[in-house]
Image (tube, rainbow, N blue to C red):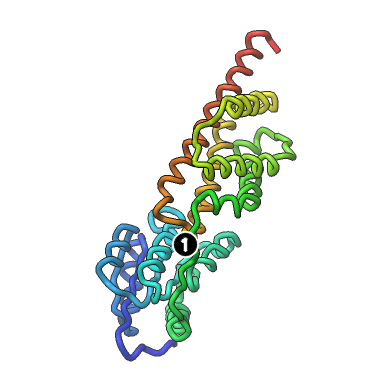
Amino acid sequence: MAATRPSRTRLLFVDDEAGIRQTMPPILEMHGFDVTIAGSVPEALTAMQSQQFEVLVADLNVGQPGDGFTIVSAMRRTQPQAVTLILTGYPAFDTALEAIRRQADAYVVKPAEIDNLLETIENLLNTHTPHQPIPAQRVPSLLSDHAEQAGHRWAKQIRSSALLREANLNDGNLQDDARGYIRWLVTRLESNDSQVSKEEISAARKHGRERNRRGYSLPMVVHECHLLRRELLQMVEENLLAIEISYVVTDLAALNNLIDSMLTATVEGYLAAETKRSGYGL
């Protein structure tokens, strides 16, 4: 078992499960840690503002999936000397683990064995150097750098979606469509122009007509768009440490406005095709 530290090390423990908050902190305190407990992101941020910590132990999903990344990001920005550790109950997801490796110093799989947790913390404290600031970038630049990955993930989500899979659609150009659409979004965001042109609305309506021709239902059209939005926001969340925080709200609002505008035009095109087909019996 890891040895008790000679002085009490200040540790912020964040988990939204009451049972874990009741059992784990007392054990950590028995091994020389001065533990502050938080059960939500706001509580964790408040604690960081009022206290200094040497260690952060946060669940990956605090209230919402991936909230642990927000907490780690905040700790690294405000207290870069602290070591950061994520608790996760989902060790099988490679993409999630890769994101954890990029953003936290280490992770421990839940339910955490106390010996393993203590040893991991001790190793981090003994070898840790303060985090160097990561060059911050705007959301458009981040998405541009990850357009290929985001497009691949969107296409994969479409293929695995129960709603879309049941239609037995064969769309071999999904990934190309995704990459092209993401690059268009990035170009618009980088130019600070969130207004969609008549030509782009026309293209989106054509996309809606094409989806109608391919046999999509209207819920499928909307769901496809929601999957894209989710993947892009997930990409941002996984790279919070690299985001220019002062612009993130503005950038995400512009991103959502562009997606909503294109979705509206796509739905209009779909409905126009549906009306034409019903009216003429095609």
**Could you tell me which quadrant the C terminus lies in?**
top right
Residue 193: where, in percent of width, then height?
50, 37
169 sits to left or right of 17: right
Crowding at dot 1, Cα within 10 Å, few <14 / some 14-19 / many 20+, comes out as many
User: In front here: 163 or 67?
Assistant: 67
Residue at the limit of the structure toward the front, as seen here: 191
Extreme top residue here? 280
Q: Amino acid at mark 1?
A: Leu
Q: Which residue is pictured at 49% across the width and 53% down the height? A: 138
Q: Residue at x 46, y 81 (%)?
A: 128
Residue 25 appears left or right of 123: left
Residue 198 visible within the image: yes
Task: Please say if 89 is above or below 160.
Answer: below
Residue 77 occupies quadrant? bottom left
* Quarter assignment of residue 217: top right
Q: Which residue is mark 1?
A: 241
From where the camera sits, is residue 108 visible?
no
**Location of residue 232 in the rendering, given as x and y in whole percent from the top left corner:** 54, 47
- Which element carries disc 1, helix, strand or loop? helix
Q: Position of residue 236 (x, y in %)?
A: 50, 53
Query: Residue 210, image x and y in percent?
Result: 68, 26
